[in-house]
Amino acid sequence: MSWWLWVVLGLILAAIELATPGGFFVIFFGISAVVVGLLDLAGLADAAWLQWLLFPVIAIAALRLFRRPLLAMLRVSEPSKVDSLVGEVAVVAADIGAGEHGRAELRGSLWQVRNVADAVLRAGQRTRVVAVDGLTLDIRPE
């Protein structure tokens, strides 16, 4: 295969990597194709069988050596976890009986809450969030 065909194949494979949400697999085969093309251009890999042998060997070696460090370098931080409201202080908006639902203010917003305590929660009373069930907060007196 001519050297420029290897380079074109490498550019096509690199474009496929950019167009797909893969995990950096195809790019190493693209790089390998460009390297084989350059080796052919330099006269170091003239035989077709050698080019076709070098192509997967270089790609798999590069994949094994560089993929994990590349992913680690691009992953600036771990994905952020959903903010937990458990343990936060909420202020009851209106009286809530034991086991009943009501509203409480937390972080400047009114939330749907459930009183999981055995006593009535009074308006203005400070409570602690003990669990989150969807958009409903379970609260107890502080």
Image (cartoon, grey):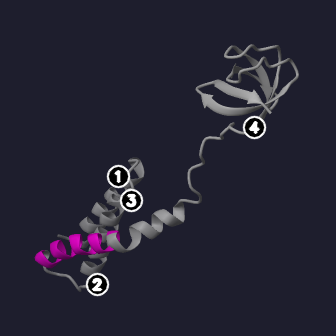
Mark-to-mark CA distance, 1 and 2? 27 Å
User: Disc 2 on helix, strand or loop?
Assistant: loop
Question: Within the image, what quadrant is residue 142 found in?
Answer: top right
The residue that mark 1 highlights is: 16
Amino acid type at circle 1 is: Ile
**Cα distance between the residues tagged 3 and 4:** 41 Å
Looking at the image, the residue that sits furthest to the left is 49
Q: Amino acid at mark 2?
A: Ala
Q: Is residue 73 left or right of residue 30?
A: right
Q: Give the percent coordinates (x, y) of residue 134.
A: 58, 26
Asked if marks 1 and 2 touch (Cβ < 8 Å), the reply is no
Sooner in the amino-acid sequence: mark 3 or mark 4: 3
Q: Which mark is residue 88?
A: 4
- Asked if marks 3 and 2 touch (Cβ < 8 Å), the reply is no
Q: Amino acid at mark 4?
A: Glu
Q: Which residue is mark 2?
A: 42
Distance between the alpha carbons at the discs numbered 4 and 2? 67 Å
Q: CA distance from mark 4 to mark 1?
A: 47 Å
